[in-house]
Amino acid sequence: MYTKDGEKYFVVDAHTHFWDASPDNWVPGQEEYAKGWIECFHAYQGLGPAETHWPLDRFQKYSEELMMHDLFDEGHVDIAIFQPTNLRQWYTNGFNTTEANAELSERHPGKFVVNTYFDPREGDAGMRAFEERVKRYGCKGVKLYTAEWMGDSRGWSLKDPEAARYLEKCQELGVRNIHVHKGPTIWPLDKDAFDVSDIDHVATNFQELNFIVEHVGLPRIEDFCFMATQERNVYAGLAVVVGGLMHARPKFFAKVMGELMFWLGEDKLIFGADYAIWEPKWQVEGFVDWNMPKDEELSDFAPLTTAQKKKILGLNAARLYDIDVPADLRLAEPPVVEPVGVPGP
């Protein structure tokens, strides 16, 4: 729980990872891509405050103790949601797997929500394995990487018929929250696989599911907003928005936040620190202190209220994942206004 100026914030970091990109985990023959991927991630860390930058060897593989410290001891996080990224074509044991995340979660009860993944290119065998993971770990969400390589395939689309089979299985299993990476490219993945157009397609077809678009399609923010405003089950995942822009590109950050608030509103924005690219401490503290600058170019956008920030930092994700929020950290329910009787003749 974070407290500032007498206000208490329940923080759900809805986008965190526990990865191993050390050279020992690189697939022989795929070293160029494994190395390039983590070095691209590491370059993004440079968008945060200088004092939060890590050396590359620490960034490649960090300890459980460091993660717990950065998220829960110092980072103001109450609950963190693991978002896996397999990348088994480049990393022998996977880059950031459901299994590794679940093991860590089991050692720290009550701290993490474990999401899993699916990849429609895995066919029937993948479907069976997906169902087993969901039942074993109690998953309520998945993280999808539509640009991930598999053999000769360099990505897939949510419009694919095989993807529809997996989404139907999600509905059947109660896996309601579909997180999809749609944002900045990471080398060597292909930019066109990150386009948000397939979200528009499946959000209409699967209205029982919530589609959380991670990184809000950046830099294609207009495409995302105009699509998301007409799909009631599309949400904006703020990983990269806060960590990548709030410090390094403050004016662009204000514009992005203004557009998201105007088109989607405070009930559909989900905070995520994107650890270990960026630590949550400075993001939580900075977002609580931040407000829309007084700038003529930003005059269309309203300032954020404390209640809106509380929703974005944790209460919205808690609602999607049925996380119990302590009573003193919830927002007060609006008073019920009784209808005024109309006097008779």
Image (cartoon, grey):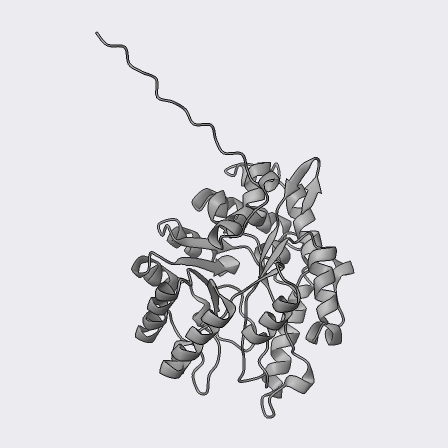
Residue 98 in which image quadrant: bottom right
Quarter holding residue 33: bottom right
* Residue at 55 percent of width and 78 percent of height: 188
In the rendering, at what x and y percent does residue 138 appear?
A: 49, 66
Q: Find residue 79 and report its horizontal and vertical position in percent.
A: 61, 56
- Residue 181 in sight from this viewpoint: no
Q: Is residue 76 above or below residue 196?
A: above
Q: Residue at x 41, y 54 (%)?
A: 234
Residue at 69% across, 75% down: 60
Q: Nearer the viewer, residue 197 or 73?
A: 73
Q: As drawn, which residue projects farthest toward the top?
A: 345
Q: Farthest right residue?
A: 51
Residue 339 vertical position relative to residue 67 in the rendered view, above or below: above
| Lateral position of residue 70 relative to residue 341, left or right | right
Residue 22 in the image, given as x and y percentages of width and height: 68, 81
**Quarter placement of the C terminus:** top left
The furthest residue to the left: 345
Asked whether, in this view, residue 118 is left or right of residue 110, the answer is left
Can you see residue 336? yes
The number of discs equals: 0
Left or right, residue 51 beside residue 154: right
| Residue 176 in picture, x, y percent from top left | 41, 60
